[in-house]
Image (cartoon, helix red, strand yellow):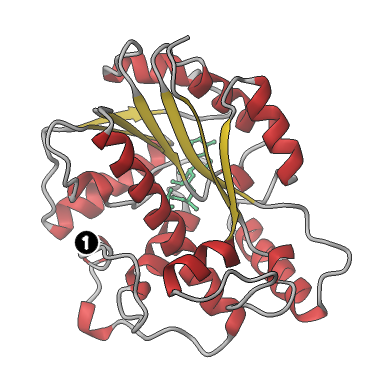
Amino acid sequence: MEAGQPSRTAMMAAHARARHQADPQRFFTDPLASKILHLDPDALLPPPDDPIARHNIRFVAARSRFAEDSLASAVTAGTRQVVVLGAGLDTFAYRNPHAGLTVFEADHPDTQEWKRQQMAAAGIALPPSLAFAPIDFERDTLADALDAAGLDRTRAAFFIWLGVTPYLTRDAVLTTLRCVAGHTAPVQVVFDYYPEPSSAMAPELRAAYEASTRRVAEFGEPWLSHFTPDGIADELRAMKLDDIDDLTGPELLARYLGEPTPGAGADAGADADAFSGHVIRAGRSTAR
Ligand SMILES: C[S@@+](CC[C@H](N)C(=O)[O-])C[C@H]1O[C@@H](n2cnc3c(N)ncnc32)[C@H](O)[C@@H]1O
Protein backbone atom coordinates (compact mmCIF):
# COMPACT_ATOMS: atom_id res chain seq x y z
CA MET A 1 0.00 0.00 0.00
CA GLU A 2 1.16 3.54 -0.65
CA ALA A 3 2.19 5.39 2.51
CA GLY A 4 -0.60 7.56 3.85
CA GLN A 5 -3.13 6.21 1.31
CA PRO A 6 -6.05 3.83 1.91
CA SER A 7 -6.16 0.53 0.05
CA ARG A 8 -7.44 0.86 -3.52
CA THR A 9 -8.03 -2.89 -3.69
CA ALA A 10 -10.42 -2.50 -0.75
CA MET A 11 -12.46 -0.21 -2.98
CA MET A 12 -12.35 -2.77 -5.82
CA ALA A 13 -13.56 -5.61 -3.58
CA ALA A 14 -16.35 -3.42 -2.23
CA HIS A 15 -17.38 -2.60 -5.81
CA ALA A 16 -17.54 -6.30 -6.62
CA ARG A 17 -19.89 -6.96 -3.69
CA ALA A 18 -22.04 -3.96 -4.65
CA ARG A 19 -22.25 -5.10 -8.26
CA HIS A 20 -23.12 -8.63 -7.18
CA GLN A 21 -26.32 -7.22 -5.68
CA ALA A 22 -27.56 -6.70 -9.27
CA ASP A 23 -26.72 -10.28 -10.29
CA PRO A 24 -29.93 -12.18 -11.18
CA GLN A 25 -28.21 -15.22 -9.60
CA ARG A 26 -27.27 -13.30 -6.44
CA PHE A 27 -26.29 -15.57 -3.55
CA PHE A 28 -24.80 -12.99 -1.16
CA THR A 29 -27.05 -10.20 0.08
CA ASP A 30 -25.40 -7.02 1.33
CA PRO A 31 -27.72 -4.01 1.42
CA LEU A 32 -24.86 -1.78 2.62
CA ALA A 33 -22.43 -2.72 -0.18
CA SER A 34 -23.56 0.12 -2.45
CA LYS A 35 -24.33 2.51 0.41
CA ILE A 36 -20.77 2.49 1.77
CA LEU A 37 -19.56 3.43 -1.73
CA HIS A 38 -22.27 6.10 -2.12
CA LEU A 39 -23.61 4.27 -5.20
CA ASP A 40 -27.22 4.25 -6.36
CA PRO A 41 -28.33 0.61 -5.92
CA ASP A 42 -30.68 0.99 -8.91
CA ALA A 43 -27.74 1.95 -11.15
CA LEU A 44 -25.64 -1.16 -10.47
CA LEU A 45 -24.72 -3.10 -13.59
CA PRO A 46 -25.62 -6.79 -14.05
CA PRO A 47 -22.76 -9.31 -14.29
CA PRO A 48 -20.35 -8.68 -17.17
CA ASP A 49 -20.44 -10.96 -20.24
CA ASP A 50 -16.71 -11.65 -19.96
CA PRO A 51 -16.52 -14.99 -18.06
CA ILE A 52 -13.29 -14.13 -16.23
CA ALA A 53 -14.55 -10.76 -14.99
CA ARG A 54 -17.87 -12.38 -14.03
CA HIS A 55 -16.07 -15.13 -12.15
CA ASN A 56 -13.89 -12.63 -10.27
CA ILE A 57 -16.87 -10.55 -9.12
CA ARG A 58 -18.78 -13.64 -8.02
CA PHE A 59 -15.70 -15.03 -6.25
CA VAL A 60 -15.50 -11.92 -4.05
CA ALA A 61 -19.17 -12.35 -3.14
CA ALA A 62 -18.78 -16.12 -2.65
CA ARG A 63 -15.89 -15.85 -0.20
CA SER A 64 -17.97 -13.46 1.92
CA ARG A 65 -20.98 -15.78 1.79
CA PHE A 66 -18.79 -18.73 2.82
CA ALA A 67 -17.19 -16.76 5.65
CA GLU A 68 -20.49 -15.46 7.00
CA ASP A 69 -22.19 -18.88 6.75
CA SER A 70 -19.24 -20.47 8.58
CA LEU A 71 -19.40 -17.73 11.21
CA ALA A 72 -23.15 -18.31 11.68
CA SER A 73 -22.42 -21.99 12.43
CA ALA A 74 -19.74 -20.98 14.93
CA VAL A 75 -22.13 -18.54 16.62
CA THR A 76 -24.74 -21.30 16.92
CA ALA A 77 -22.04 -23.37 18.63
CA GLY A 78 -21.34 -20.55 21.10
CA THR A 79 -18.72 -18.21 19.56
CA ARG A 80 -19.29 -14.58 20.51
CA GLN A 81 -16.21 -12.84 19.02
CA VAL A 82 -15.33 -12.32 15.35
CA VAL A 83 -12.24 -10.55 14.05
CA VAL A 84 -12.36 -9.20 10.49
CA LEU A 85 -8.71 -8.93 9.46
CA GLY A 86 -7.91 -6.47 6.66
CA ALA A 87 -11.57 -5.47 6.75
CA GLY A 88 -11.42 -2.86 4.01
CA LEU A 89 -14.98 -1.73 3.22
CA ASP A 90 -16.51 -5.00 4.42
CA THR A 91 -19.91 -4.24 5.93
CA PHE A 92 -20.52 -7.30 8.12
CA ALA A 93 -20.04 -5.33 11.34
CA TYR A 94 -22.82 -2.90 10.33
CA ARG A 95 -25.41 -5.58 9.50
CA ASN A 96 -24.33 -8.10 12.15
CA PRO A 97 -27.43 -10.27 12.72
CA HIS A 98 -26.05 -12.11 15.77
CA ALA A 99 -27.08 -10.78 19.18
CA GLY A 100 -24.14 -10.74 21.57
CA LEU A 101 -21.48 -11.10 18.86
CA THR A 102 -18.62 -8.59 19.23
CA VAL A 103 -16.90 -7.62 15.97
CA PHE A 104 -13.28 -6.48 15.82
CA GLU A 105 -12.11 -4.83 12.62
CA ALA A 106 -8.33 -5.03 12.26
CA ASP A 107 -6.94 -3.13 9.30
CA HIS A 108 -4.19 -0.80 8.19
CA PRO A 109 -4.76 2.55 9.95
CA ASP A 110 -4.86 4.47 6.64
CA THR A 111 -7.64 2.24 5.29
CA GLN A 112 -9.46 2.26 8.60
CA GLU A 113 -9.50 6.04 8.83
CA TRP A 114 -10.81 6.30 5.25
CA LYS A 115 -13.50 3.71 6.00
CA ARG A 116 -14.72 5.72 8.98
CA GLN A 117 -15.03 8.77 6.70
CA GLN A 118 -16.91 6.73 4.07
CA MET A 119 -19.24 5.42 6.77
CA ALA A 120 -19.93 8.82 8.24
CA ALA A 121 -20.60 10.33 4.80
CA ALA A 122 -22.96 7.43 4.00
CA GLY A 123 -24.80 7.86 7.31
CA ILE A 124 -23.96 4.34 8.49
CA ALA A 125 -23.74 4.28 12.29
CA LEU A 126 -20.97 2.49 14.18
CA PRO A 127 -22.67 -0.21 16.28
CA PRO A 128 -21.67 -0.58 19.95
CA SER A 129 -20.71 -4.21 19.22
CA LEU A 130 -17.78 -3.01 17.05
CA ALA A 131 -14.17 -2.34 18.08
CA PHE A 132 -11.36 -1.14 15.82
CA ALA A 133 -7.82 -2.58 15.97
CA PRO A 134 -5.43 -0.64 13.73
CA ILE A 135 -2.51 -2.79 12.53
CA ASP A 136 0.14 -3.12 9.85
CA PHE A 137 0.51 -6.88 9.38
CA GLU A 138 4.07 -6.38 8.11
CA ARG A 139 5.26 -4.46 11.18
CA ASP A 140 2.94 -4.84 14.16
CA THR A 141 2.01 -7.75 16.40
CA LEU A 142 -1.58 -8.82 15.86
CA ALA A 143 -1.92 -10.18 19.39
CA ASP A 144 -1.02 -6.75 20.83
CA ALA A 145 -3.47 -4.95 18.55
CA LEU A 146 -6.30 -7.33 19.48
CA ASP A 147 -5.46 -7.25 23.19
CA ALA A 148 -5.64 -3.46 23.08
CA ALA A 149 -9.02 -3.66 21.31
CA GLY A 150 -10.38 -6.04 23.97
CA LEU A 151 -10.39 -9.50 22.37
CA ASP A 152 -10.75 -12.12 25.09
CA ARG A 153 -8.29 -14.94 24.34
CA THR A 154 -10.00 -17.25 26.81
CA ARG A 155 -13.26 -17.23 24.79
CA ALA A 156 -13.82 -18.77 21.37
CA ALA A 157 -13.11 -16.55 18.39
CA PHE A 158 -13.70 -16.59 14.64
CA PHE A 159 -11.39 -14.81 12.20
CA ILE A 160 -12.32 -13.66 8.68
CA TRP A 161 -9.42 -12.66 6.42
CA LEU A 162 -10.55 -12.08 2.84
CA GLY A 163 -8.66 -10.61 -0.07
CA VAL A 164 -5.54 -9.86 1.93
CA THR A 165 -2.97 -12.68 1.77
CA PRO A 166 -1.76 -11.93 -1.80
CA TYR A 167 -0.78 -8.40 -0.71
CA LEU A 168 1.39 -9.54 2.18
CA THR A 169 4.77 -11.22 2.33
CA ARG A 170 4.75 -14.94 3.07
CA ASP A 171 6.27 -14.17 6.49
CA ALA A 172 3.47 -11.75 7.40
CA VAL A 173 0.81 -14.24 6.27
CA LEU A 174 2.28 -17.07 8.35
CA THR A 175 2.98 -14.84 11.36
CA THR A 176 -0.66 -13.69 11.30
CA LEU A 177 -1.93 -17.27 11.04
CA ARG A 178 0.33 -18.29 13.94
CA CYS A 179 -1.22 -15.55 16.04
CA VAL A 180 -4.70 -16.80 15.15
CA ALA A 181 -3.62 -20.35 16.00
CA GLY A 182 -2.20 -19.08 19.29
CA HIS A 183 -5.67 -18.07 20.50
CA THR A 184 -6.15 -19.90 23.78
CA ALA A 185 -9.81 -20.88 23.32
CA PRO A 186 -11.26 -22.73 20.28
CA VAL A 187 -10.69 -20.78 17.07
CA GLN A 188 -11.55 -20.82 13.39
CA VAL A 189 -10.32 -18.76 10.47
CA VAL A 190 -11.65 -18.31 6.95
CA PHE A 191 -9.23 -16.83 4.44
CA ASP A 192 -8.44 -16.94 0.76
CA TYR A 193 -5.19 -17.47 -1.08
CA TYR A 194 -4.01 -17.79 -4.66
CA PRO A 195 -1.83 -20.59 -6.01
CA GLU A 196 1.00 -19.64 -8.37
CA PRO A 197 -0.45 -19.48 -11.89
CA SER A 198 0.03 -22.81 -13.64
CA SER A 199 2.34 -23.06 -16.64
CA ALA A 200 -0.54 -24.81 -18.41
CA MET A 201 -2.83 -21.82 -17.91
CA ALA A 202 -4.78 -20.87 -21.04
CA PRO A 203 -3.39 -17.73 -22.72
CA GLU A 204 -6.53 -15.66 -22.08
CA LEU A 205 -6.44 -16.54 -18.38
CA ARG A 206 -2.73 -15.74 -18.13
CA ALA A 207 -3.33 -12.40 -19.86
CA ALA A 208 -6.17 -11.62 -17.40
CA TYR A 209 -4.02 -12.65 -14.44
CA GLU A 210 -1.09 -10.52 -15.59
CA ALA A 211 -3.29 -7.52 -16.36
CA SER A 212 -4.97 -7.60 -12.95
CA THR A 213 -1.77 -8.07 -10.95
CA ARG A 214 -0.04 -5.34 -12.99
CA ARG A 215 -2.94 -2.97 -12.32
CA VAL A 216 -2.88 -3.40 -8.54
CA ALA A 217 0.93 -3.16 -8.48
CA GLU A 218 0.68 0.18 -10.28
CA PHE A 219 -1.24 1.65 -7.40
CA GLY A 220 1.09 0.27 -4.77
CA GLU A 221 -0.49 -3.08 -3.89
CA PRO A 222 1.63 -5.73 -5.63
CA TRP A 223 0.95 -9.42 -5.18
CA LEU A 224 3.64 -10.75 -2.87
CA SER A 225 2.67 -14.29 -1.97
CA HIS A 226 1.13 -17.46 -3.35
CA PHE A 227 0.50 -20.77 -1.64
CA THR A 228 -0.18 -24.28 -2.91
CA PRO A 229 -3.13 -26.20 -1.40
CA ASP A 230 -0.77 -28.82 0.08
CA GLY A 231 1.70 -26.19 1.27
CA ILE A 232 -0.83 -24.07 3.15
CA ALA A 233 -2.49 -27.19 4.61
CA ASP A 234 0.90 -28.35 5.95
CA GLU A 235 1.48 -24.93 7.52
CA LEU A 236 -1.97 -24.94 9.14
CA ARG A 237 -1.56 -28.47 10.50
CA ALA A 238 1.82 -27.51 11.96
CA MET A 239 -0.04 -24.74 13.82
CA LYS A 240 -2.61 -27.31 15.05
CA LEU A 241 -5.35 -25.76 12.92
CA ASP A 242 -6.01 -29.18 11.51
CA ASP A 243 -9.73 -29.15 10.79
CA ILE A 244 -9.36 -27.85 7.22
CA ASP A 245 -11.83 -27.27 4.39
CA ASP A 246 -10.25 -25.90 1.17
CA LEU A 247 -12.48 -24.96 -1.77
CA THR A 248 -11.53 -23.59 -5.16
CA GLY A 249 -13.43 -20.61 -6.52
CA PRO A 250 -15.26 -22.75 -9.11
CA GLU A 251 -16.25 -25.27 -6.40
CA LEU A 252 -17.59 -22.48 -4.23
CA LEU A 253 -19.51 -20.88 -7.08
CA ALA A 254 -20.98 -24.21 -8.14
CA ARG A 255 -22.28 -24.58 -4.59
CA TYR A 256 -23.97 -21.18 -4.55
CA LEU A 257 -25.15 -21.14 -8.16
CA GLY A 258 -26.67 -24.59 -7.76
CA GLU A 259 -24.52 -26.09 -10.51
CA PRO A 260 -22.75 -29.46 -10.55
CA THR A 261 -19.38 -29.27 -8.82
CA PRO A 262 -16.94 -28.65 -11.64
CA GLY A 263 -13.74 -30.52 -12.33
CA ALA A 264 -12.92 -27.18 -13.87
CA GLY A 265 -14.55 -23.76 -13.88
CA ALA A 266 -18.22 -23.91 -14.65
CA ASP A 267 -18.17 -20.15 -14.54
CA ALA A 268 -14.77 -19.16 -15.84
CA GLY A 269 -13.48 -21.44 -18.52
CA ALA A 270 -11.82 -24.81 -18.62
CA ASP A 271 -8.84 -24.19 -16.33
CA ALA A 272 -10.25 -21.52 -14.06
CA ASP A 273 -8.93 -23.50 -11.09
CA ALA A 274 -5.48 -22.42 -12.17
CA PHE A 275 -6.46 -18.77 -11.89
CA SER A 276 -9.11 -18.52 -9.22
CA GLY A 277 -8.40 -18.10 -5.55
CA HIS A 278 -9.11 -20.79 -2.99
CA VAL A 279 -11.05 -20.22 0.22
CA ILE A 280 -10.07 -22.12 3.36
CA ARG A 281 -11.79 -22.65 6.67
CA ALA A 282 -9.37 -23.98 9.26
CA GLY A 283 -9.86 -24.42 12.95
CA ARG A 284 -9.34 -26.10 16.27
CA SER A 285 -12.34 -27.09 18.38
CA THR A 286 -10.41 -27.44 21.64
CA ALA A 287 -8.63 -24.96 23.90
CA ARG A 288 -4.82 -24.92 23.84
C1 LIG B 1 -8.38 -6.33 -1.30
S1 LIG B 1 -8.61 -5.45 0.20
C2 LIG B 1 -9.72 -6.59 1.00
C3 LIG B 1 -10.63 -5.88 1.94
C4 LIG B 1 -11.75 -6.71 2.52
N1 LIG B 1 -11.27 -7.80 3.31
C5 LIG B 1 -12.67 -7.18 1.44
O1 LIG B 1 -12.72 -8.40 1.18
O2 LIG B 1 -13.33 -6.35 0.84
C6 LIG B 1 -7.07 -5.66 1.07
C7 LIG B 1 -7.11 -5.18 2.50
O3 LIG B 1 -5.85 -5.55 3.10
C8 LIG B 1 -5.40 -4.48 3.90
N2 LIG B 1 -3.94 -4.54 3.95
C9 LIG B 1 -3.06 -4.68 2.94
N3 LIG B 1 -1.80 -4.67 3.41
C10 LIG B 1 -1.90 -4.51 4.76
C11 LIG B 1 -0.96 -4.43 5.82
N4 LIG B 1 0.35 -4.50 5.60
N5 LIG B 1 -1.43 -4.28 7.08
C12 LIG B 1 -2.76 -4.19 7.32
N6 LIG B 1 -3.69 -4.27 6.37
C13 LIG B 1 -3.27 -4.43 5.10
C14 LIG B 1 -5.88 -3.23 3.19
O4 LIG B 1 -5.95 -2.13 4.08
C15 LIG B 1 -7.26 -3.68 2.69
O5 LIG B 1 -8.25 -3.42 3.63
Name the residue at 24% across, 60% down: 36
Secondary structure of residue under mark 1? loop
Q: Which residue is nearer to you in this view: 185 or 135? A: 185
Q: Residue furthest bottom?
A: 49
Q: Quadrant of residue 198?
A: bottom right
From the top left corner, tell me how far across and down residue 247 is, in percent.
58, 53
70 is higher (above) or lower (below) than 278: above
Instruction: Say left or right for 175 vs 148.
Output: right
Q: In the rendered structure, which amino acid carries the disc numbered 1? A: Leu
- Give neighbour class at mark 1: few <14, some 14-19, many 20+ (Cα, 10 Å): many
128 is higher (above) or lower (below) than 115: above
From the top left corner, tell me how far across and down residue 117 is, in percent.
23, 49
Disc 1 residue: CB within 8 Å of ligand 1: no
Q: Quadrant of the N terminus?
A: top right
Q: Quadrant of residue 79?
A: top left
Q: Residue furthest front?
A: 260
Q: Which residue is nearer to you in this view: 141 or 151? A: 151
From the top left corner, tell me how far across and down residue 125 is, in percent.
11, 47
Name the residue at 40% across, 20% down: 186
| Residue position marked by numbered label 1 in the rendering | 32
Question: Does residue 182 show up?
Answer: yes
Q: Which residue is nearer to you in this view: 150 or 113? A: 150
Question: Does residue 140 show up?
Answer: no
From the top left corner, tell me how far across and down residue 229 is, in percent.
71, 45
Name the residue at 37% across, 73% down: 20
